[in-house]
Every structure is written in structure tokens, then in C-alpha cells.
């Protein structure tokens, strides 16, 4: 950079950017360092239910929570443990809920003959049930026409 003034401007812009980015980002535990004191440490991981009833969904498009343990269930390119019970081929044998038709749609809306890549990694959207307090207050109410419970 030949002009020393342009280097100066570049520095000012970089500093402005850094300070504004810092001001906007705020995590749930605040500004405290991760291990500074017990209050700010993440809570102990609750134990998941081994086998539980499915929970009512709060709204139509909500991915249902997983009512059973999933320890050791492998999902990779070659193998998908979830589908061994939840696919349309296997659900009857295991008395499991079959994946819904939305799981067959490609991102362009084409209906495929097998699970779409965007719905292959089940735990991207479905998480096991756990008896945990919400991290932030939530007063969500579904609109009446889409109420599931
Ligand atoms: C050994 C069979 C089996 C495997 C493997 C399995 N499930 Fe299930 N799953 C079930 C059964 C059976 C139910 C129904 C439980 C009930 O209705 O009480 C269920 C229920 C669910 C539900 C709740 C559906 C609803 O309507 O509320 C979700 C979500 C789910 N499983 C996701 C998964 C995911 C994700 C995986 C993989 C990480 C997985 N399951 C692996 C048998 C299985
Ligand atoms: C991109 C997010 C996403 C992924 C990935 C995904 N799901 Fe779902 N799933 C949903 C949503 C949202 C619903 C509820 C609305 C619907 O059926 O589309 C749902 C519904 C379900 C249901 C209940 C169906 C019913 O008729 O009540 C089951 C069972 C299920 N998913 C299992 C799975 C399994 C097994 C996988 C992995 C192969 C998977 N899902 C991957 C978002 C996802």
C-alpha cells in the first residue's frame, strides 16, 4: 500500500467494525468467562428419558421431540439408525411413527422416493425430550387455527 493515509483509513474501518460487532453479540451467560464462577457455568446435563410418551406439539411445523434415548444411534452416509425404525418400510415392524411426507421433499419441492438429503440427519431438527427449564422466558401461543393441543 503506497499511500500511508489509505492504510490509516483501513485501520479506522477495521476498528469500527470490530467494536460494533463486539457490542451486538451477547450470549445467555453474559460477558463472564466460561469458567469464572459456578453461577455462569453450564448446568449439568440432565438425564434423558429412556422411554417416554410423545409430547404434544405446540404448533404444526414443530419437529416432535424424541421420546426415547438415542445413545449410540449412528447417522452417517452409509447408515441411519433412525430409519431402521422410522422409515416407511420399517415403521410397522417397530411400532414407530413413520416419517411424514415432508421428509421426502427436495429443496425444490420435488417429491423423492426416499428421504431427502435435507431431512437425512434427523438430529439436526429432532432432539430427545429432557425435563429442563427454558433458558429464556417464552410466552408463545399458536394461532387458533394451527393449535395442536
Ligand atoms: C428401535 C426403534 C427406534 C429407533 C432406532 C429410533 N426410534 Fe424414534 N421412535 C420409536 C418408537 C417405537 C416411537 C414411538 C413411541 C411412542 O409412540 O410411544 C418413536 C418415536 C419417535 C419420535 C416422536 C414422534 C411423535 O410423533 O412425537 C421422534 C421424533 C423420533 N422417534 C425420532 C427418532 C430419531 C431422530 C431417531 C434416531 C436418532 C430415532 N427416533 C430412532 C422407535 C425408534
Ligand atoms: C430439517 C428438519 C428435519 C429433519 C432433518 C428431520 N425432521 Fe422429522 N420432522 C421435522 C418437522 C418440522 C416435523 C413436523 C412437521 C412435518 O411432518 O414435516 C417432523 C416430523 C417427524 C415425525 C412425525 C411424523 C408425523 O406424521 O407425525 C417423525 C417420526 C420424524 N419427523 C422423524 C424423523 C427422522 C427419523 C429423521 C431422519 C431420517 C427426521 N425426522 C429428520 C423436521 C425434520
Image (cartoon, grey):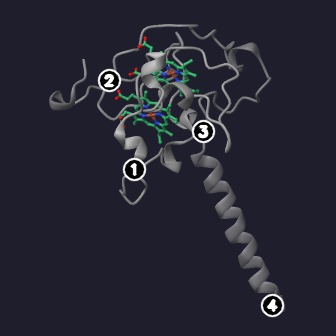
The quadrant in which the N terminus is found is bottom right
Marks 3 and 2, how far apart at CA: 28 Å
Marks 2 and 4, how far apart at CA: 60 Å
| Location of mark 4 (residue) | 3
Is mark 3 in CB contact (under 8 Å) with mark 4? no
Vertical position of residue 57 compared to residue 131: above or below: below
Q: What element carries label 1?
A: loop
Marks 3 and 4, how far apart at CA: 37 Å
Which circle, 2 or 1, is nearer the viewer? 1
**Residue under the point 54% across and 31% down:** 83
Marks 1 and 4, how far apart at CA: 55 Å
In the visual, does 124 lie left or right of 4? left
Is mark 1 in CB contact (under 8 Å) with mark 3? no
| Location of mark 3 (residue) | 26
For mark 1, does the 10 Å Cα neighbourhood hold few (<14), some (14 to 19), or many (20 or more) residues? some
| Location of mark 1 (residue) | 105
Q: Residue furthest left?
A: 145
Is mark 1 in CB contact (under 8 Å) with mark 4? no
Q: Which of marks 1 and 4 is nearer the N terminus?
A: 4
Determine whether the beta carbon of the residue marked 2 sits less than 8 angstroms from the nearest atom of ligand 2.
no
Which circle, 1 or 4, is nearer the viewer? 1
The image shows residue 43 at horizontal and vertical percentages of 67, 15
For mark 2, does the 10 Å Cα neighbourhood hold few (<14), some (14 to 19), or many (20 or more) residues? some
Which circle, 2 or 4, is nearer the viewer? 2
| Location of mark 2 (residue) | 58
The foreground one among 116 and 13 is 116
Amino acid at each position: 500500500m503506497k499511500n500511508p493515509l489509505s492504510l490509516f483509513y483501513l485501520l479506522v474501518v477495521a476498528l469500527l467494525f470490530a467494536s460494533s460487532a463486539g457490542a451486538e453479540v451477547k450470549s445467555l451467560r453474559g460477558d463472564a468467562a466460561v469458567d469464572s464462577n459456578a453461577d455462569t457455568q453450564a448446568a449439568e446435563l440432565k438425564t434423558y428419558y429412556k422411554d417416554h410418551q410423545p409430547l404434544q406439539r405446540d404448533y404444526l411445523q414443530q419437529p416432535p421431540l424424541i421420546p426415547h434415548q438415542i445413545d449410540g444411534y449412528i447417522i452417517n452416509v452409509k447408515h441411519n439408525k433412525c430409519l431402521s425404525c422410522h422409515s416407511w418400510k420399517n415403521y410397522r415392524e417397530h411400532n414407530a411413527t413413520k416419517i411424514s411426507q415432508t421428509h421426502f421433499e427436495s429443496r425444490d419441492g420435488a417429491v423423492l422416493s426416499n428421504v431427502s438429503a435435507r431431512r437425512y440427519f434427523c438430529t439436526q431438527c429432532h432432539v430427545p425430550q429432557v425435563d429442563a427449564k427454558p433458558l429464556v422466558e417464552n410466552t408463545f401461543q399458536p394461532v387458533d387455527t394451527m393449535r395442536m393441543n
